[in-house]
Image: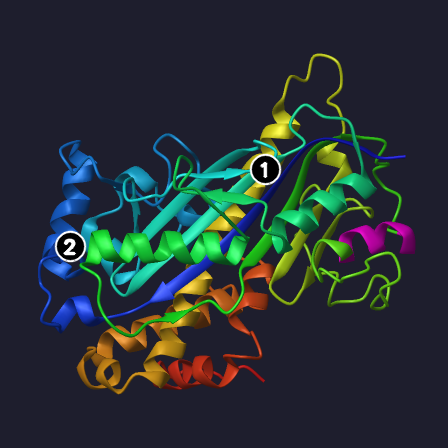
Amino acid sequence: MVTVNDSKISFVWGSCFADHLWGDNQSAPMLWRKPPYVLEFNQQRAGSGSGALDFAWYRGQKSAFWRHYLGGQALGEVRGSDAWEALVPFRLLTYIPDVETDQGERIVIDTYGYELGVVVVLTVNAFKRASATLDQWVDRLSALRRDPVYLLDAGAGARTADIVQVMDAIAKSLRDQAYGGGGASVSSNDPISIANIVQATGGIPGVPVDAILQRYLHAVTAWPGNWKTAVLPTLGASPPFLPQRATNQLPNDALYAVGRSLAVWRPGLFAPPAPGAGKRRRHTLSCFGHNLSAAAAQAEYLRLIAVAYAAQSKLRDRLDSGRVRAVGARIDALLRGAGTTYRSDSVKQILTDKNSKEQVNALLALAGADPIS
């Protein structure tokens, strides 16, 4: 029997807009144009940048996603002009509303500011130093995904909210404060979720996932109303079992994806470390989860540009054609795992969303790339 001792779930939500670049309201900083962006990025490298901003990655952290996304170069050596061409955001360190859960779980909120929008990653550390069954794990993650278990703007004016309301409120706050507000926007229709067991006992490395275990993984990705009776996809087939890199992979390992949700099952890593091994395995899964979240945020931003470009004539008329082709080229690279870029089928799941397939294909065509079939 598996006992969960540490678990995280991350939610990703984005909003794409452009009025701050050419609208009447020019009170917001014009950081989102190339010259000031490049200047700020290079000042951050020199240690003299704005205290309200930082790199998309945490300083001192070996972020595999951003390192691979940027061609394999050392993150400390990335130039502002290269970051701009690669559509790399800044992390916004202010403008974040207070958020709590009804059980007081630790929450970490990463907010990314881009040229044409914002993306929010909210991570709840559920069952920290706990002893939870998989049934309890599913029930709590389901509540965090579906129910109004959050307190937004904690204090006298706090209100309860579900995750969609929380993420949308954070995104709107960021837009108001960092972009001067504005008009139309295109937002995520539902949050991406990434469930990750960081430490547990009882999982047996090397034993393939069976139908019983699949039901738990399906419950925290498909989010069925009654997960105990839901009809399951074919066991072991892709999708929902995504292909994985062979490095350190065991037959029991699984990346299980349904729609825009992903669950990580790696008993070879979340099992207690051998005597004298320290906390390296727990650290490995935490880093893996962070990379998956960063990749999901970047993929969602690129996808939303495609949706906004199709829906907003002003954006089509005024956005530089070279910039649009650059978005299409980045989407193509992530879909193909080209060059040294980050490779994960979870990213492909986001970019091939059936609700935006036509719009994404339009940008791929502009970049001269093959469409999604």
Give the residues in magenta: 210-218
**For the point 36% across and 85% down, which residue is it?**
310
Q: In this image, 227 relative to 363: left or right? A: right
Give whichever of 186, 359 is nearer the camera: 186
In the rendered structure, find residue 31 and report the number of the disc placed on it. Answer: 2
Give whichever of 163, 84 is nearer the camera: 163
**For the point 84% across and 55% down, which residue is it?**
215
Q: Amino acid at mark 2?
A: Leu
Q: Amino acid at mark 1?
A: Asp
Answer with mark 2 or mark 1, whichever residue precedes in sequence.
Answer: 2
Q: Sort mark 1 into few (<14), some (14-19) or many (20+) by Cα contacts within 10 Å.
A: few
Q: Which colour style is shown?
A: rainbow
Residue 114 horizontal/vertical position (percent) = 28, 58
Give whichever of 224, 32 is nearer the camera: 224
Residue 31 horizontal/vertical position (percent) = 15, 54
* Main secondary structure type of the part rendered in magenta: helix
In the rendered structure, find residue 102 and report the number of the disc placed on it. Answer: 1
